[in-house]
């Protein structure tokens, strides 16, 4: 059976949101890139840097009080379909935490991970994720819901055994407490011209 080379819906939607934000806030990606360079001092390759920048920009960076995904979700016109909005909502409700890799499927496409802070288990399905994780390994990741499973979004950071012990201690002491994101209502002023 031939594999469908079509990009996942989420990938298509990410670029639809980027186009949307670029139209309503044309200079924000440039500004965000400069801000991100000051925040992220890790030494990433170009592809990893751009992936992390895009995840940060869409999910965490506020533009006048809302993230680009929140703007997209709240947009009242029919630019985004109902299905698009469900996917956007899943992105807005992302989970970012420290996880232990509990199981890896034989084909290295599916991962069962356990949130260190809550002990919740998540099934991660991947398409082209590199074969770099190990069972019982410790990672920091951002995950997004898709149906009855999740997927990694942005970069996945792995930690050494030495770092793992220190981080586990800090996590369990409450140092990395989750902050609940508040739902946001955006008011749109849309003028119609005849």
Image: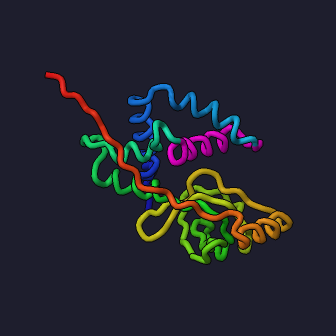
Residue 112 vs residue 129, the one in the foreground: 112
Numbered-mark total: 0
Residue pictured at 40% horizontal, 56% vertical: 89
Residue 111, position in %: x, y? 60, 70
Residue 47, position in %: x, y? 65, 41
Q: Quadrant of residue 130?
A: bottom right
Residue 181 vs residue 136, the one in the foreground: 181
- Check residue 189 for magenta coloring: no
Magenta range is: 42-61
Of the 4 image quadrants, the one containing the C terminus is top left
Residue located farthest toward the top when viewing the structure as drawn = 194
Q: By what rule are the colours in the image chosen?
A: rainbow
Residue pictured at 60% horizontal, 73% vertical: 112
Residue 184, position in %: x, y? 40, 50
Q: Is residue 175 above or below residue 73?
A: below
Residue located farthest toward the left when viewing the structure as drawn = 194
Residue 112 appears in the rendering? yes
66 sits to left or right of 50? left
Residue 36, position in %: x, y? 64, 37
- Check residue 44 for magenta coloring: yes
Q: Is residue 10 above or below residue 162?
A: above
Residue 106 appears in the rendering? no
Q: Is residue 170 above or below residue 25?
A: below
Residue pictured at 77% horizontal, 61% vertical: 159
Q: Quadrant of residue 178?
A: bottom right
78 sits to left or right of 121? left
Residue pictured at 58% horizontal, 58% vertical: 142
Of the 4 image quadrants, the one containing the N terminus is bottom left
Could you tell me what secondary structure mostly forms the magenta stretch? helix
Q: Is residue 25 above or below residue 140?
A: above
């Amino acid at each position: 059976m031939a594999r469908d080379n079509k990009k996942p819906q989420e990938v298509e939607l990410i670029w639809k949101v980027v186009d949307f934000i670029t139209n309503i806030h044309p200079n924000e990606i440039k500004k965000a890139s400069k801000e991100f360079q000051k925040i992220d001092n890790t030494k990433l390759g170009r592809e990893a840097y751009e992936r992390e920048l895009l995840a940060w920009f869409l999910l965490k960076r506020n533009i006048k009080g809302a993230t680009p995904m929140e703007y997209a979700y709240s947009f009242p016109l029919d630019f985004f379909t109902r299905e698009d909005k469900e996917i956007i909502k899943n992105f807005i409700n992302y989970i970012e935490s420290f996880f232990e890799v509990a199981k890896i499927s034989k084909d290295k496409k599916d991962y069962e991970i356990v949130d260190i802070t809550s002990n919740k288990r998540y099934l991660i399905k991947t398409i082209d994720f590199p074969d770099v994780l190990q069972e019982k390994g410790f990672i920091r990741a951002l995950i997004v819901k898709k149906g009855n499973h999740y997927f990694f979004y942005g970069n996945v950071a792995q930690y050494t055994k030495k770092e793992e012990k220190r981080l586990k201690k800090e996590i369990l002491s409450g140092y990395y407490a989750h902050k609940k994101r508040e739902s946001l209502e955006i008011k749109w002023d849309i003028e119609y011209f005849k």
